[in-house]
Amino acid sequence: MGLRIPRPELHNLMLKVLFTTVSRSLISLAGVVLTSISAVLFLSLFAIEEFGTGHHGAYTGIIAFIVIPSIFVLGLVLIPIGIALLRRSDRKRLAKGEPAPLAPVIDFNIPRTRFIVAVVAVLSVVNVVIIATGTYKGVETMESTEFCGGACHSVMSPELTTYNRSPHSRVRCTQCHIGPGANWFVKSKLSGSWQLVSVALDLYPRPIPTPVENLRPARETCEQCHLPTRFVGDKLKVITRHAEDEANTPKKTVLMMKVGGVREGGARGVHWHVDPANTVRYRGDKKRLYVSEIELSLGDGGTRSFKNEAGPPTDGGVMVMNEEWRTMDCVDCHNRPTHVYQRPTDELDLALTTGALDMSLPFIRREGLRVLKTPYATWDLAQAGMKKDLGEFYAKNNPDLDPKKVELAADALFTIYKRNVFPTMNITWGTYPSFRDHFDDSGCYRCHVSDMKTSEGKKLSQKCDLCHVTLAEEEEDPEILQMLSGE
């Protein structure tokens, strides 16, 4: 006849054996400690994040919703692992005839046992809620701009700086770099894993090479907001430049841009290139600065082919061509829709127009450009060098000028420099050109050049009025603007 243990004693024995089992395993005990501490930290930080005030940086989100939940899950996993390893050790001891602790006995006939099991079930639900909340908030954190731009500060500082000045500064990074759907989300996180290793081990290139490889097609990202089938029509554009004379004379160019879009009878204007009815393919170098061949498949069924007779570019005698054909989309012209690195001339003209740079300073447009183009190893050297260089120029040529005005101008120039030049990443003027126009013999002129011809010798059109009509060019007081303003 077996030994019968009264139920109260059995219950106490069960609890004793259960807690003894956990406490005997250092692995399980460590799991309990990790889980308990991380749960308290997570709930505290979650409350601060949800109900607190003020801005919390990228690292706060990483710690609260990625690191701590990971530790929490690790603790939960360690508890059964420790118990399993302990039981394995006990079985070996029993096989050798050595005494081993009893296994816990769960008897649901005992009310207190049912109560404890219910408490464990409730705590398990709490664990699931914590894990689910941590997962959701972790994904939310990883999709935030603070995470993308702030977590890897040394690498992404240039991109975050230009992003904050861009037309898309209110659009989250992931909306353009990942887009909707789980497929690309998973791909981006797998890619991000290697990027994390690169940053940790200092393996990343300086500057970051462009264009970005394996980027999601623009039709699946840009066109979530910008519809190619929408007809925009014509838009007036006024460009203000300043001469490099003593008065920094402002001159205006007025263009009627044929932005166009799709309308009855086919697409017109600049956006003809992305008309869904047409397909434009091209082949060029890896940086897309040079185009060697173009194929047009028109909506009416016709096709045209062009080849650049100038020949492919070389680097040290080696061709740098990308043999793959690419279908043209938004980013082939708007290659920097967000991370825009401006030209020094554009920045100077904008600063003079808005008053950020004092236009009354003689030759400040000319001297400002010279100072901005001077190479510096660090930002600190740039700031000191600009003040010294500009101060010496005006002390020599305009000794009666207020030194305070010169110092403010140097500060304005350094602000421009700091927004576009990043010595630690080897980013300087022209490192990342924009293809949206044709001021630097790029952009439009990659395709629309005199050497781009069909096999019959017909050139690809270079007519300016295909994209815009010039209403005034480099005029101090254009008549068209007087008419439009009612003067």
Image: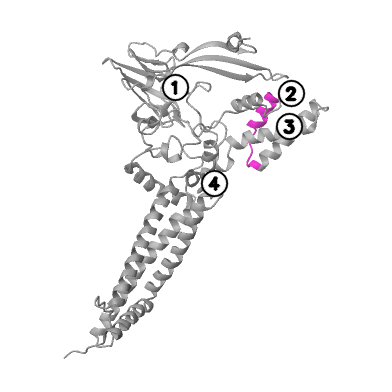
Q: Residue drawn at (41%, 59%), measured in percent from left and top?
A: 70
Left or right of residue 84, residue 319 in this image: right
Is residue 101 in view from this perspective?
Answer: no
Mark 4 element type: helix
Quadrant location of the N terminus?
Answer: bottom left
Under mark 2, the amino acid is: Ser
* SS label for mark 2: loop
Tell me the crowding category of disc 2: few under 14, some 14 to 19, or many 20 or more residues within 10 angstroms, Cα based. Answer: few
> Which residue of the protein is positioned furthest toward the bottom in this rendering?
1
Q: Earlier in the sequence, mark 2 or mark 1?
A: 2
Residue displayed at 47% across by 12% down: 464
Q: Which residue is mark 2?
A: 360
Q: Which stretch is magenta?
A: 359-379
Q: Position of residue 335 (x, y in %)?
A: 45, 30
Q: CA distance from mark 4 to mark 2?
A: 38 Å
Q: Is residue 360 magenta?
A: yes
The residue under label 3 is 390
Say which residue appears at 36% left-offset and 44% top-offset.
185
Between circles 2 and 3, the one closer to the viewer is: 2
Image height of 429 relative to 455, above or below:
below
The residues tagged by marks 1 and 3 sit, at their Cα atoms, a distance apart of: 37 Å
- The residue where tag 4 is placed is 154
Residue 238 is left or right of residue 122, and the answer is: right
- Please, is residue 438 above or below residue 407 in the view? above
